Image (cartoon, rainbow, N blue to C red):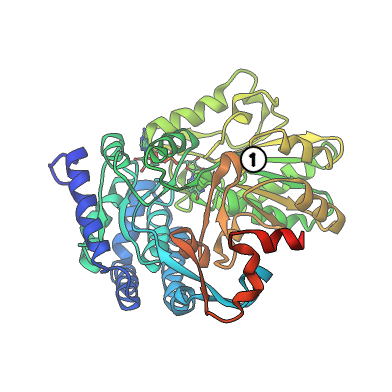
Amino acid sequence: MTGEVFDGKKAEVMVKDLRASFKAGKTKPYEWRVSQLEGIVRMIMERETEIMEALQSDLAKPNMEAYLHEISLSKAACLFALKQLKGWIKPEKVVRASFTTFPSSAKIVPEPLGVVLIISAWNYPFSLLIDPAIGAIAAGNAVVVKPSEIAPATSAFFAEHLPEYVDNSCIKVVEGSIAETTALLEQKWDKIFYTGNGRVGRIVMAAAAKHLTPVALELGGKSPVIVDSNVNLKVAVKRMAVGKWGCNNGQACIAPDYIITTKSFAPKLVDALKSTLEEFYGEDPLESADLSRIVSFSHFKRLTELLDEENIPEKIVYGGERDEKHLKIAPTVLLDVPHDSLIMKDEIFGPLLPIITVEKLEDSFELINSRPKPLAAYLFSKNKKLEEDFVQKVSAGGILINDAALHVTNPHLPFGGVGDSGTGAYHGKFSFDTFSHKKAVLSRGYATEMRIRARYPPYTYHKQIL
Ligand code: NAD
């Protein structure tokens, strides 16, 4: 960040300039959108090492995870948008008409919303900023991106390098924390896309309401995992473990938050988790280079307080080790934690995985639905009837059967929450739609006017036919 303070006045001037660029039509042409998206692809390709270094500095994110989850997925999202853009911006012909509009032609024309704000979070600090920006640019908007200050190296990367690859009269980076974000939120935007926790989500929504600005809120929640005994346990546990600890050491919005299984199956599941974790991260996971560290001391403290709550340490069946100096916490599995314990209250967002046991798996649907709606819900089972019931009865942003976290990589699926886990969705075409207005256009000629004579006053003819 430069030494200059970014206050309300600066924010106002910036938005005014961006609005002028937007009104001048700079962001609308297909060619402009393509050149910006190509710029982003170039940035990713030319600066891959710097992105990895930034992620290493912010989170000790393993290079493989940095590459797979942030660099390669963001590049793929950008290339996908480039490939599909012509089709996305094309007006959609509407062939069906109502009696009252016959004859006419109709179409849906996507138009950019205007000047949009993207505020992102620290856990996937590269992709959570660039992915929505791809949608906003593809849709033809002027964009301000605000990286998370909790990931300062990635934030600095964007501030330094994004302007080298995109049109600075239409795309801006603003670094900062609460003061700067508040200054941004005071402005009138045409859309605010926020990723982060629900507490700040409420602040964003309240600020947006003052200007009737639409919002997309990409929030989190406690994403449950139901594990049936009718599974390929070895594979299931590997997928569960990589979806939890292999995603930023559990600091992921769709990481499995807690497991529900039957009392009788729990010991087998715990054994399988233990051996998989040992296979993945060795006997001393605190030394493993394949696990991210906890992002900050305050998050480290929050997580260790969950583990240190009265009666909780004896529930630990694997892990529990910590290293405060290096902000590391080992993958930790807990069995039969009380439902009213702190660890079962809010989203864990870290490497702790409690297991809750029930008599019958079907009981877990009610348990999940009695809580705020999660961002993801997982079921591991070969039982098709159970799968069907799970999809029908459990409400969540997204559902994945027999795997964890992987649904996020399919650009043909919308990614977003429901209820407390958020509103609005993105990825692929859904990103384009989120930053577009679908304008309804109906066009009529002058034939067959008699058909709708009853429309016009005086209504004498209308009375005759009633
Ligand atoms: P964070 O601390 O980085 O905050 C997110 C953004 O909000 C930052 O840019 C920050 O500057 C801004 N902010 C913080 N306090 C603010 C305030 N008072 N006023 C205005 N802006 C403010 O990230 P976080 O909230 O700790 O992120 C973790 C949460 O995000 C978890 O709940 C997680 O599940 C969720 N999340 C969701 C997704 C998703 O795609 N749905 C992805 C990642 C994280």
Residue drawn at point x = 42 percent, y = 54 percent: 128
Q: Position of residue 138 (x, y in %)?
A: 39, 68
Give 12 or 304, whichever is nearer the viewer.
12
* Amino acid at pointer 1: Lys
For the question of whether residue 203 can be seen, the reply is yes
Q: Position of residue 300 (x, y in %)?
A: 44, 33
Q: Position of residue 143 (x, y in %)?
A: 31, 57
Residue drawn at point x = 43 percent, y = 55 percent: 62
For the question of whether residue 7 can be seen, the reply is no
Q: Position of residue 194 (x, y in %)?
A: 42, 46
Which residue position holds label 1? Answer: 373
Give 437 or 245, whichever is nearer the viewer.
437
Residue drawn at point x = 69 percent, y = 28 percent: 337
| Ligand 1 image position (quadrant) | top left
Q: Residue furthest left?
A: 3
Q: Quadrant of the C terminus?
A: bottom right
Above or below for 220 versus 79: above
Q: Residue furthest bottom?
A: 447
Q: Which secondary structure lies at badge 1?
A: loop
